[in-house]
Amino acid sequence: MTAPGGPVLPSLLAVFAHPDDESLLAGGVLAQHHAAGARTAVVTATWAPDSRRAPELAAALAVLGAGAPRLLGYNDARNPEAAPGRPRLVDAPLEEAVGRLVTHIRDFRPDVVVTHDALGQLTGHPDHVRTHQITLLAAEAAGLPHAYPDTGKPWQPSALYAATHPESGVGLLRTLLEGVGKTVLAVPDAYVTTSVDVTPWATRKWEAISAHRGEVARERSLPGILARLPEADRNQIISTEHFTRLSPGPTKGAPDRLTV
């Protein structure tokens, strides 16, 4: 599909660990792609469909135009109320978790998949790291006919991106996160292959972040930190999204698929 007078954008599947990661890390790109008529969806690795955060996730995805929640239903590494009775994502058998994600990739058939970086974003949360690992394996396996044959017809995304933060782009976030006792992990600037100015979608991105009301109310969570900032400072933080192009992808020389 094509937005009137705009470019054709690829279909986009975001795979993140927790409700709110999608809005914080790729909310602008998700809103941008939806506005251009592209198909978008989000897979969330932790929290159960009947948990308190599921309705907030649904509200955020509605703002971004990313469809209904797709929850793998694993427990959070640090919050046992996320999915009582279910294994933590970090403890779940790798083959099982990869297979669950392959099912979603083959069902949605995205051109592009976006996930966490290898550091687990700024704070290195173990669920972020594990989601990165699972997504790399699932994006590869989804295109192989003999891998997980019971999860649908093979589908190979043409590009895989890791949402990330370059050292030069952390800025005010470093002071804010360190101020609540969190470690800040950023990647060398050269690691970033794509930076997207999402200023036109910043208002919608903030609306999606704000839909995660429980996190906005918490003092040490990033949504809560952002909510206490002056609007100008908050917009400065959320108006650029950075990504690193990983494999699999199109053949050498093919154009980048994540559109600025």
Image (spheres, grey):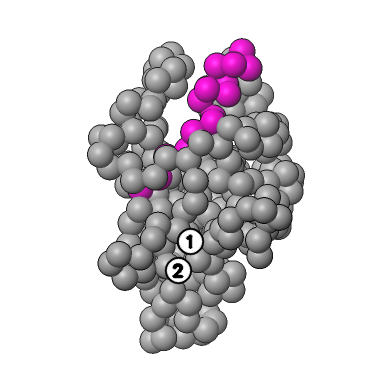
Residue in view at x 48 percent, y 40 percent: 196
Q: Which amino acid does label 2 sit on?
A: Pro
Q: Name the residue under label 1.
A: 112
Any part of residue 144 in sight:
yes
The residue carrying mark 2 is: 157
Q: What residue type is labelled 1?
A: Val
95 versus 154 height, above or below: above
Q: Residues within 10 Å of mark 2 (few under 14, many from 20)?
A: many
Which is more toward the observer, 228 or 220? Answer: 228
Q: What stretch is highlighted in magenta?
A: 230-244
Relative image position of residue 42 (x, y in whole percent): 59, 55
Quadrant of the frame with the N terminus? bottom right
User: What x and y, as percent, mark residue 209?
Assistant: 64, 34
Residue 214 position by quadrant = top right
Q: Distance between the residues labelled 2 and 1?
A: 6 Å
Name the spot of residue 77 as percent of width and height, x first: 46, 44
